[in-house]
Image: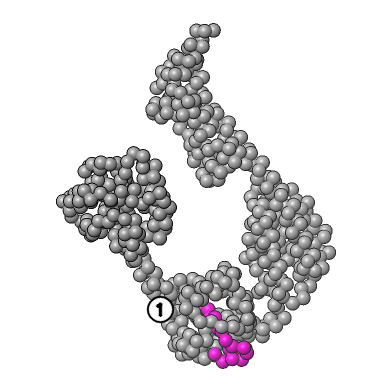
């Protein structure tokens, strides 16, 4: 039932509305009538109504402000307003903030019925939406493990890099995690051979059985969090251990339990231990790298990264994904974002031990090669990367500051050149579009069609056109068509229907409306005015 409140100073109106609703709308429940703003506010605050029918005078001079607040904090309540013709502007404005409609006094039964039907439809839509949201929320809670796994995957892969965001994720998912942090990656040995005997369902159950065994050991003792990363890979975030030997004992227990469960060998790569929560992704990359040494250390083993690469603290800290993004950003000419990415890359490098000049030169060279390749792939007119990044200087780089300043200055020049190229390309597209419109104005053309002609997205073309013409595409097209129609009118005796067709309008009514809007008078007035001028001449 839709709970209805009527608010008015006039007792006769209250009685009439109440009687009409009871007689004609059985799914509306008349709750009460009120005659003060204070009563309405109390009803809204306590959510004691679905629909309020009110004389706009009852809200006083702050009616718009009140409706803004109510629509923000209690959008589930709908209003129907009524008032005099002098109140029209206020009632129309209130429709932006939760009013279903408005009526003029004296309220006619037909108008009231129409507005009540509109309110009923709004209520039903809101009720349906609440039901859908409730079902969606229930489904979300039932599948919360999916979102937990997604979060942990993004964390270990380095997709989430903001420390506060990571902490918020752990708090929301109720994962109690404390430093130091280390990541271990478990893989089934010779999985490609093993999986040949499985169907799809068995693959799922197989890896899930392993996850359950692992969780009993590490999650049960509040020592870690495990999740499935692939059919043959489980990632474990281990926390609270200060010594590698402690982690090795825990993982050895995991390995033995899993082996007993599946009767197969497994290998575990172990990353370093870190105090900063953001370095979980570094430890993950180290664990993956450690597993690559299975062929040397032996399968069915636990392999810490420091055993196989004791001196390497650069490779797995280097944010390769930020470098890739830097390359793409440079090729679209966004210098400010390039600097932000460059700062992130060099912040990571500064956390590593002393970096040899030869490695610095190689890092810089890799970035330059990638930028040059991407520019060529996009057919950008970049005749030699050397004009922006003097390659002879690369091998003179000795320090991180040298490398940073070299790239920053070069990116500034390169991005400026890219912007220049893109501006030239935009100008070319715009001029071609203008020529097309001026010559094909009588055809069935629109912004989407022209955007596709010049291999642009619709949104990009609209933005580009507005940038160079300072008017919308449709306004420009209308202006051209009206200008051409004036020429036709002056040079022939054609009536409006013929002129409209000649300039691209199938509907003469639309043509006449646009003509009057642009010129300020009707086509008939335009003909009369010009005929009079011709006679005077």
Can residue 187 be seen in the rendering of this structure?
no
Q: Quadrant of residue 242?
A: bottom right
Judge whether residue 129 is colored magenta.
no
Instruction: Choose between 329 and 19: the one closer to the eye.
Output: 19
Q: Is residue 436 left or right of residue 204?
A: right
Q: From the viewer's perspective, is residue 248 above or below residue 156?
A: below
How many marks are shown on the rendered structure? 1
In x, y percent, where is residue 6?
Answer: 26, 53
Residue where numbered disc 1 is placed:
205
Q: How is the image coloured?
A: one colour
What residue is drawn where x is 62% and y is 78%?
Answer: 276
Image quarter where the C terminus lies is top right
Instruction: Choose between 287 and 404: the one closer to the eye.
Output: 404
Q: Quadrant of residue 158?
A: bottom right
In x, y percent, where is residue 536?
Answer: 52, 7
Image quarter where the N terminus lies is bottom left
In x, y percent, where is residue 186?
Answer: 53, 81
Q: Quadrant of residue 289?
A: bottom right
In x, y percent, where is residue 194?
Answer: 47, 79
Q: From the viewer's perspective, is residue 177 above or below residue 13?
A: below
What residue is drawn where x is 51% and y is 10%?
Answer: 534
Judge whether residue 236 is colored magenta.
yes
- Say which element carries label 1: helix
Q: From the viewer's perspective, is residue 118 above or below residue 305?
A: above
- Look at the image and give the residue range highlighted in magenta: 234-250
What residue is drawn where x is 37% and y is 48%?
Answer: 95
Q: From the viewer's perspective, is residue 84 above or below residue 337?
A: above
Q: Is residue 52 left or right of residue 169?
A: left
């Amino acid at each position: 039932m839709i709970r209805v409140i009527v608010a008015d100073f006039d007792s006769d109106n209250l009685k009439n509305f109440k009687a009409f609703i009871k007689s004609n709308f059985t799914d509306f429940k008349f709750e009460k009538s009120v005659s003060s703003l204070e009563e309405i506010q109390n009803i809204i605050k306590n959510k004691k109504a679905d629909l309020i029918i009110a004389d706009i005078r009852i809200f006083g001079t702050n009616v718009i402000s009140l409706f803004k607040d109510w629509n923000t904090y209690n959008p589930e309540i709908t209003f129907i307003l009524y008032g005099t013709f002098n109140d029209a502007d206020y009632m129309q404005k209130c429709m932006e903030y939760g009013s279903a409609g408005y009526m003029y006094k004296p309220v006619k039964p037909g108008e009231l019925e129409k507005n009540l039907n509109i309110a009923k439809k709004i209520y039903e839509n809101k009720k349906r939406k609440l039901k859908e949201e409730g079902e969606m929320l229930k489904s979300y809670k039932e599948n919360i493990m999916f979102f937990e796994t997604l979060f942990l995957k993004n964390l270990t892969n380095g997709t989430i890099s903001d420390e506060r965001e990571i902490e918020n994720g752990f708090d929301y998912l109720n994962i109690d995690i404390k430093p130091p942090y280390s990541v271990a990656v478990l893989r089934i040995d010779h999985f490609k051979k093993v999986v040949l005997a499985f169907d799809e369902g068995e693959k799922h159950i197989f890896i899930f059985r392993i996850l359950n065994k692992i969780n009993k050991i590490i999650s049960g003792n509040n020592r870690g969090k495990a999740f499935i990363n692939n059919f043959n890979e489980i990632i474990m975030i281990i926390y609270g251990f200060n010594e590698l030997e402690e982690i090795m004992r825990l993982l050895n227990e995991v390995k033995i339990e899993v082996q007993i469960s599946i009767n197969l060998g497994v290998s575990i790569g172990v990353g370093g231990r870190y105090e900063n929560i953001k370095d979980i992704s570094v430890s993950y990359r180290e664990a993956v790298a450690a597993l690559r040494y299975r062929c040397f250390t032996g399968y069915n083993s636990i392999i810490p990264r420091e055993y196989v690469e004791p001196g390497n603290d650069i490779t797995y800290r280097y944010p390769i994904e930020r470098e890739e993004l830097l390359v793409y950003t440079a090729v679209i000419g966004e210098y400010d974002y390039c600097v932000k990415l460059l700062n992130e890359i060099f912040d990571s490098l500064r956390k590593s031990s002393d970096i040899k000049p030869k490695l610095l030169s190689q890092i810089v060279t890799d970035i330059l090669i990638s930028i040059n390749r991407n520019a060529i792939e996009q057919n950008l007119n970049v005749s030699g990367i050397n004009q922006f990044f003097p390659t002879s200087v690369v091998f003179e780089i000795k320090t991180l500051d040298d490398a940073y300043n070299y790239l920053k200055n070069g990116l500034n020049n390169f991005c400026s050149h890219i912007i220049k190229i893109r501006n030239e390309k935009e100008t070319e597209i715009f001029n071609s579009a203008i020529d097309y419109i001026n010559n094909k104005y009588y055809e069935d053309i629109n912004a989407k069609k022209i955007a596709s002609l010049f291999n642009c997205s619709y949104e990009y073309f609209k933005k580009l056109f507005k940038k160079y013409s300072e008017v919308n595409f449709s306004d420009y097209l209308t202006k051209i068509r009206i200008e051409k129609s004036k020429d036709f009118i002056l040079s022939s005796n054609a009536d409006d229907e013929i002129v409209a067709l000649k300039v691209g309008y199938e509907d003469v009514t639309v043509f006449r409306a646009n003509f009057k809007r642009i010129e300020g008078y009707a086509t008939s007035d335009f003909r009369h005015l010009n005929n009079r001028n011709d006679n005077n001449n």
